[in-house]
Amino acid sequence: MRGITANRHRLAEIVAGSTGLVTALSPTIGYETACAIALEAHHTGRPALDLIRERDLLTEAELTVLISPASLTGLPAL
């Protein structure tokens, strides 16, 4: 439809706040750690990425790569 555009900032916030995002990180941080992060995020309402950052599980550079659209989908970003 013409005139409709995606709010990329809001979409990025939604993805960053998704508990399911830890699934993509589990090969790197480990299954049990990913489950613990997801559970805490679910119970506290805090974004999983915030918890990962607080625990220094991944660097910001690693997170940027791992949660990029290309990494998550296997397709190049638009």
Image (tube, helix red, strand yellow):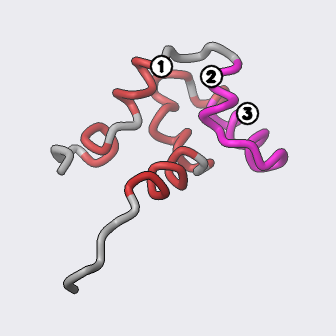
Amino acid type, mark 3: Ala
Separation of residues labelled 2 and 1 (CA atoms): 8 Å
Assign the magenta stretch its main secondary structure: helix
Seen at 28% across and 48% down, the residue is: 73
What numbered label is drawn on residue 53?
2
Q: Residue furthest front?
A: 3
What numbered label is drawn on residue 3?
none
The nearer-to-camera label among 3 and 2 is: 2
Query: Could you tell me which quadrant the N terminus lies in?
Result: bottom left
Disc nearer the start of the sequence (2/1): 2
Separation of residues labelled 3 and 1 (CA atoms): 20 Å
The quarter holding residue 65 reads top left
Asked if residue 53 is among those painted magenta in the image, a careful observer would answer yes
Q: Are marks 2 and 1 in contact (CB under 8 Å)?
A: yes
What residue does disc 3 label? Answer: 36
Seen at 62% across and 48% down, the residue is: 19
Q: Which residues are magenta?
A: 34-54
Separation of residues labelled 3 and 2 (CA atoms): 14 Å
Amino acid type, mark 1: Glu
Q: Position of residue 6 (x, y in %)?
A: 34, 66
What numbered label is drawn on residue 60?
1
Q: Residue furthest right?
A: 44
Seen at 60% across and 48% down, the residue is: 17
